[in-house]
Amino acid sequence: MNRNERIQDWDLIIEGKTSLFDLKFNDVWQYRDLLALLVKRDFISFYKQTVFGPLWFFIQPLFTMIVYTFVFGNLAGISTDGLPQPLFYLAGITAWSYFADCLTKTSTVFRDNANIFGKVYFPRLIMPLSIVVSNLIRFGVQFLLFLVLLAYYYAIGVELAFSWVLLLSPVLLVLMALFGLGLGLIITALTTKYRDLTFLVTFGVQLMMYGTTVIYPLNAAPENYKPWIAANPMTTIIETFRLAFLGAGNFSWASLGYSSVAIGVIFILGVLIFNKTERSFVDTI
């Protein structure tokens, strides 16, 4: 068998220089077993040495909801669109937590996995994708807590209405994942040269939360700031999420279309920047 025949039999060719738009999605699919393994690793390693284990999935949003209800609902007296305060805040926390976790954990992918990336070949996009999928498990558990609280209020006679927007729930989930992944990929690429961004991410996410309708409805926002708050793609997602399950919130096809386009642009930009940076980041990390 000559050399050319042997080359034709290879099913994987690793090249140092490829096109910026060669995103290797086929390679990602071929390594789907590795993706599942990383998701399992993230879930087990994070809670392996904790006392409460996966119960933290419930404890964190529950205590956050109680604090928000006391501070923003009772002390500050911020409107909740006529909805029960715990239910209003938990809806916002559930959606925001998934986006924030995807963003913050993806933003340190290069730094956290520098040793692995420098020794073993696999599609680098597998790492941030595993974060998004593993956080999806956490979102599912927190969403279950939200449904339990929703059922409780129905049982005690509180009038709540579902909306046809409920059918858009899978779309909202995908948008949250793509938004967090896209921003995280951009930030992790930038941190290979600008380490200060690592310290700003958590602080920036907190500030961004106050610019989103997590602790207040869009209707209660001051008129001067409302256009800026509405320009945040997460505002549309959270407002639509509340309308779907609680019957109170702002929704329009125009706002959903705007958020979808903005998130799509950020995601594509993030993947392109990540694809460019991962070729040489080992030399600068």
Image (spheres, rainbow, N blue to C red):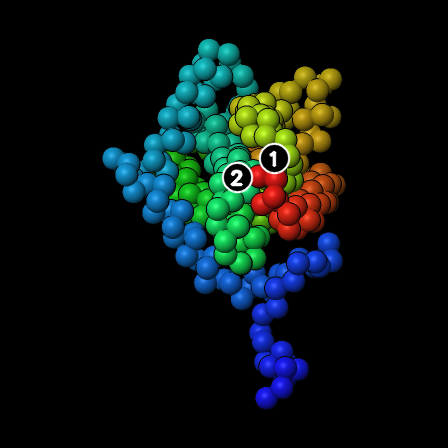
1 and 2 marks in contact (CB < 8 Å): yes
Residue closer to the observer: 65 or 152: 65
CA distance for labels 1 and 2: 8 Å
> Residue tagged by mark 1?
191
Report x, y in % for residue 110. Answer: 55, 42
In the image, taking residue 166 as reference, residue 33 lies left or right, namely left
Residue closer to the observer: 76 or 34: 34
Quarter occupied by the C terminus: top right
Q: Amino acid at mark 2?
A: Arg
Quarter occupied by the N terminus: bottom right
Does residue 264 show up? no
- Label 2 crowd bin: few (<14), some (14–19), many (20+), radius 10 Å: some
Element on which disc 1 rests: loop
In the image, taking residue 128 as reference, residue 251 lies left or right, namely right
Q: Amino acid at mark 1?
A: Thr
Residue at the image position 50 percent from the left and 53 percent from the top: 119
Residue closer to the observer: 6 or 169: 6
Residue at the image position 54 percent from the left and 16 percent from the top: 78
Report x, y in % for residue 247. Answer: 55, 36
> Residue tagged by mark 2?
111
